[in-house]
Structure formats: structure tokens, C-alpha cells
Amino acid sequence: MSSKIGFWLVLITIAVVLFYLLSPMLTPFFVAALLAYLGDPLVDRLEAKKLSRTLAVTIVFVVISLIILVFFLFLVPLLEMQIRSLGEKLPGYLDWSFGMFGTYLQEQLGVDPSILEGERLKDLITSNWQQTGGLIKNVIQTVSKSGFMIVGWIGTLALIPVILFYLLRDWDNLVAYIHDLLPRAIEPTVTELARESDEMLGAFLRGQFMVMIALSILYWLGLTLIGLDFALLIGFIAGLVSFVPYLGLIVGITIAGIAVLFQTQDALNLLWVLLVFVAVQVIEGSVLTPWLVGERIGLHPVAVIFAVLAGGQLFGFVGILLALPVAAVLAVIMRHLHETYKQSNVYTDESLP
């Protein structure tokens, strides 16, 4: 028994060390693996309709590539345009804010508004915004200064579709191969844990990802209908953080409320913002989540936040990519250990002190 434990400890240690050392070059493999995991059910459905595996993979591969291409060619420039527009209007918004707050301080509290140092704060905020607002432009300029960095980025981007295609084509074979390598004594337990982990990941990654996209679009359309200038940017942010329940609602209402006050200087327009977010929440709760996620249990919101932060702190971008899958697997394992403990003598033996 001790030799088996030692073998698994050595194997796990080697795997962790290799992962840590190789993490800078593993990004294209993990991005491709994540996309392949998301796309494999679609490939299986097409296969069920009597299409060959290669043809099904090709169709799914083209769809995924087009979605990514549309995002970078159309959505990213639109977001950049809204960020730039916000930067141009920011000084006027700040002037109005300091004016309103200064008037309140003077009339209600008898405090001199000059203590706010409004002009100094405005210059500080606008200068920092100008440095960070053109995010895409700054990234491109930084990368363009290093030829080796450009080659590295191009190589990484070129590897992702190649790896994705082969992983999609051989996904079922890889799963079967790993299953065949499992020691027979633990194969039933590992298979059950893998099945439960896949259900949780499917509910969270596949279902919740689609919910996030749908919410972003609905927020964007709703805020556009009420005439908000930065509807796309606010909708994208609110949808992006909606993987944590109610966080997208809170963040979206806060940002949209501030934006509509800046734009219209009329507090009554907050009701329109509230109406949009309440309507979208009703659609999410009654249609989107039951349809796309179902009744499967996802990760606890606190576990999601901790996993993403811990993954980024320990392993950088690769850690962020792996944070949720690893957290889902750990959650399943912890639940299994909890059930095993509740059935063990340690828990049920009343003679223990």
C-alpha cells in the first residue's frame, strides 16, 4: 500500500512541477482544449445525424472560428470606439458631478466646495483615462516594439486552430485512451467522478457561457432602446461578470445608472435603467437559465471568484483558463469525500471521544 501511495505522490509531484515550468508555453494547448471541450457535444450531435466525424469536426471548427473572428473584427473595435468616446465626454461628466456635489456641500452642509479640488481631481482622472482608455492601441504599440514578441504571438495564435482541429477530431479517442489507462481498482470511482465533473463543467462552461452572451446582447439592446450612449460597453461588462449570480445585475445597474445620470442629468431616467435590468433578469430566470443550464448544479459563486483569483495568482493566464475546470473537479471530489466520511466509522462511531 505504501509503495502505491508513494508512486502516486511522485507522479502528481512530477506533473505539478512540469505544469509550473511549462505553463508559459501551454496557453495555446489549454485554449484549444477548452474550445474542444465546448465543441465536442456539437460534433457528437452531428455524428448522430449520420455525418462523418471529420465532416462534423470541420463544421464545428468553422463555426467556432467565425464566432471568434466576428468578435475580434467587429465587437472589439466597437468596444474600443465606446471607450474612446467615454474618454472624450469624461471631463464634461466630471464637471457636472463636481458642480452638483459642490452645490450640495455648500447649501446643505455649509462646506466650501473648493476643498474637493475639482480641477485637480479632473486632471488626474482624465490623464489616467487617456493612458488606459486606448487599451488595444497601447497593447499593439507595446507588442510592435519587440519582433520576437510578435513572432511568439503569431505562433501562439496559429497553433490554436491547428491543435483545436485535432483535439476535436480525436476527443472521444483521447477520453477512451485515458479511461483505459486507469488502474482497474479505482476505475469505477474515477469514472463516476469524471461523469459528475463533466455534468458540472457542462452546466457551467457550456450553459453559463451561452447565458453570458445572451445577457450581454439583451442588456445592450435594452439600454440602446432607452437611448444610453454606452449601451454596448455596459452590456458587455454586465454580461461578462454575470457568471457570479446577481453580480452582473448589481454591476450593470450601478454603471448604467451612473451613465444615465451623467448623460441626462435627470434622476427619473434611472427608472428606465431599472426596468431594463429587471426585464432581462425575468427573461434569464424564466427562459435562459432553465433552457441553457437546466437544473444541473454549478459552482458556488464564492468558489468561482476564489478559483479565478487563485489560478491567476499562481499560474497567470493559464491558471485563469484552468481555474474553473479544476475547481469543478475539486468540488466533485470534495463532495465524494464528504459522502465517504459521513458513511465511515469515524463519523458514525459514537464510542470515539
Image: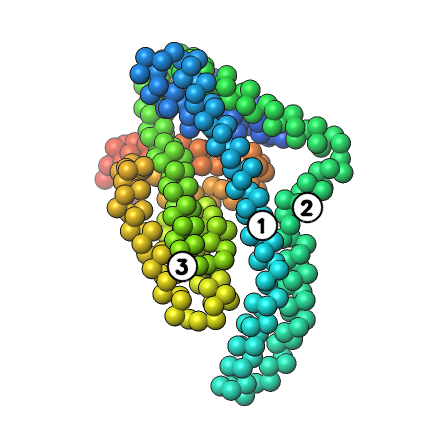
Residues under numbered marks 3 and 2 in contact, where contact means CB atoms less than 8 Å apart: no
Residue 17 shows up from this direction: no
Q: Secondary structure at mark 1?
A: helix
* Label 2 vs label 1, nearer the camera: 1
164 displayed left or right of 47:
right
Query: Measured from the top left, where is residue 25 in percent x and y?
Result: 62, 27
Disc 2 on helix, strand or loop?
helix
Q: Amino acid at mark 2?
A: Asn
The residue at the point 71 percent across, 38 percent down is: 143
Residue toward you, 314 or 171: 171
Residue underneath mark 2: 138
- The residue labelled by disc 3 is 226
Q: Quadrant of residue 288?
A: top left
Q: Is residue 291 visible?
A: yes
Name the one closer to the observer, 144 or 89. Answer: 89
Indicate the quadrant containing the N terminus: top left, top right, bottom left or bottom right: top left
* Mark 3 or mark 2, whichever is nearer to me: 3
Residue 191 versus residue 248 in the image, above or below: above
Q: Name the residue rendered at 50%, 27% in the picture.
A: 65
Instruction: Write down the residue under mark 1.
Output: 81
